[in-house]
Image: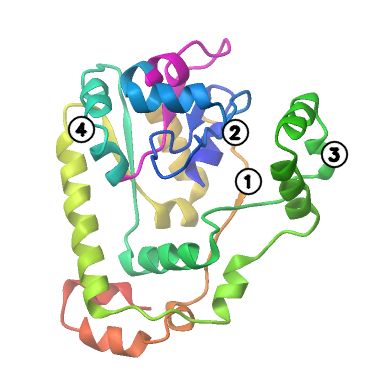
Amino acid sequence: MLVSLLNAHPQVTCFREVLNPAHEFIIYGVEGYDNDRAADRALRDADPVAFLLQRIFCAHPAGTAAVGFKTQYEQIWLVPRALEWLLAQDDLRVIHLRRRNLLRARVSIRIAQMTGVWMERKPPPLAGLLTPANALRALRHPGRATKVVRATLRPKRPAADARQQPIALSLDECRFYFNWVEQNAAQYDDAFKGHPLVTLYYEDLVADRRRRLEEVQKFLGVRPQSLPVATRQQNPEPLRELIANYDELRAAFKDTKYAEFFD
């Protein structure tokens, strides 16, 4: 959601998880970049700093004032050379996006793992897909183009599918995940403490998008403006409807600091 919002600003270019090693391709999420370019993947794996310099923090259209990318905790820790280089950049600014309700975050991850869908975009008008750049991309990757058109004509609703089968979470799984996030968040803040850093909570962004986005835009040094939302919120249902053993978990965490995660 945040990447999509920032990319809607004419002065901002925000890539997606370009350091994510889990795929055989790079999900740039920026117009003009080919996710399937083997040379980019080879460069990133061989020399992540050169990759960042040549493909991310490189020349961009006139008027671009802020360029960055999204990373999960585990991704940045796995690329120490890239982390060391980033920490050495005096003009680096960090947006630490967090969630207050870690139980809901864990549920979202489990549902995404089950459905294979990690993000839902609002379907664009079909006419918006008929551009020369998209036509060339369709010729190169016809299978992917077919999926895009089908999703536009008949978008999937994985959250609805997940509602039919509530998930079960173990106590150990929840405890581990809560502790893991807290430890990584603290480590992340400590690593970047020498740079301007703003912590943004997802719940605040959803509740007061205009105000929070204005704060983020000012932090990045770009002209604040209204930004359109291009993604759907996934799994907005009450946690009781999403978790099969909700009452069991609620009772187990009743007298802990995690009790606030339950509706």
Q: Let me know if residue 222 appears in the view.
A: no
| Secondary structure of the residue carrying numbered label 1 | loop
Local crowd at mark 2 within 10 Å, few (<14), some, or many (≥20)? Answer: some
Q: Which mark is residue 192?
A: 4
Contact between marks 2 and 1 (CB within 8 A): the answer is yes
Q: Residue at x 78, y 37 (%)?
A: 129
Q: CA distance from mark 2 to mark 1?
A: 9 Å
Question: Looking at the image, is mark 2 or mark 3 earlier in the sequence?
Answer: 2
**In the displayed structure, would residue 64 be above or below residue 117?**
above
Q: Quadrant of the rendered structure where residue 92 is?
A: top left
Question: Looking at the image, is mark 2 or mark 1 earlier in the sequence?
Answer: 2
Which residue in the protein does label 1 denote? 230
Residue 9 location (% of width, % of height): 57, 29
Which residue in the protein does label 3 denote? 127
Question: Looking at the image, is mark 3 or mark 4 earlier in the sequence?
Answer: 3
Q: CA distance from mark 3 to mark 1?
A: 16 Å
Kind of residue at badge 2: Ala
Kind of residue at badge 4: Phe
Span highlighted in magenta in the image: 51-73
Contact between marks 3 and 4 (CB within 8 A): the answer is no
Q: Residue at x 24, y 77 (%)?
A: 259
Contact between marks 4 and 2 (CB within 8 A): the answer is no
Kind of residue at badge 3: Ala
Circle nearer the viewer, 2 or 3: 3
Local crowd at mark 3 within 10 Å, few (<14), some, or many (≥20)? Answer: few
Q: CA distance from mark 1 to mark 4?
A: 30 Å
Q: CA distance from mark 2 to mark 3?
A: 19 Å
Contact between marks 2 and 3 (CB within 8 A): the answer is no
